[in-house]
Image: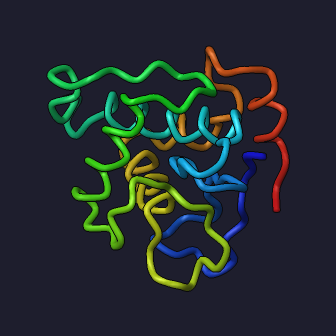
Amino acid sequence: MAHRLMLPNKPLGLPYMWNIDQHVGDQTRENQATDVELVKLLIRSALEFGRGGGTDGYENNPRLVVNGEFDQTLAFWVYRLQFTFRIVPKDGMFSPVRRPAAGTPGLMQLNYVMRQRNALFWADLASAPGISVALRTELQRSV
């Protein structure tokens, strides 16, 4: 289940972050639909709100459709962002943040980028247009 993870020490200046419960991209088991939908929403939104109104080359690459299905387009973007953020290991997965003090996980970096590019949209992600009722409901939950 996707949720808002409260960050008492505010790493990267984030008071909270949008988090997932299970790995997204793990091909050994089924990915949770709302976790996949959240990752797609974060990636697409961060790219579409690119620096200075640009799209960071997003228009020249596969476009993400925000839904709960893990597909080849999401796999492409997960790997690309792992290289961009210099995330180790480059395993094709976004993992849930369990201990915010342990480095800067990819999902936290993605939240940071999205917040930098559009703080109002990031803060009210649970009200984003076009997301499923299930994701909207889960994002109301804080941990």
57, 70: nearer the viewer: 70
Farthest residue to the bottom: give it.
102
Give the x, y percent position of residue 86.
25, 67
Image position of 68 (left or right of 65): right
Q: Quadrant of residue 58?
A: top left
Q: Which residue corresponds to the image point at 61% horizontal and 32% vertical from the top-left?
A: 37
93, 132: nearer the viewer: 93
Q: Quadrant of residue 33?
A: top right
Give the x, y percent position of residue 24.
56, 48
Q: Is residue 50 above or below residue 106?
A: above
Farthest residue to the front: give it.
28
Q: Which residue corresponds to the image point at 28% horizontal and 62% vertical from the top-left?
A: 85
Image position of 141 (left or right of 24): right
Image position of 111 (left or right of 88): right
Give the x, y percent position of residue 88.
34, 73
Image position of 138 (left or right of 49): right
Q: Is residue 101 above or below residue 69?
A: below
Which quadrant does the C terminus fall into? bottom right
Give the x, y percent position of residue 59.
20, 20
The chosen color scheme is: rainbow
Q: Is residue 12 above or below residue 41?
A: below
Q: Which residue corresponds to the image point at 69% horizontal and 26% vertical from the top-left?
A: 127
Q: Which residue corresponds to the image point at 70% horizontal and 35% vertical from the top-left?
A: 34
Q: How many numbered dots are placed on residues in this image?
A: 0
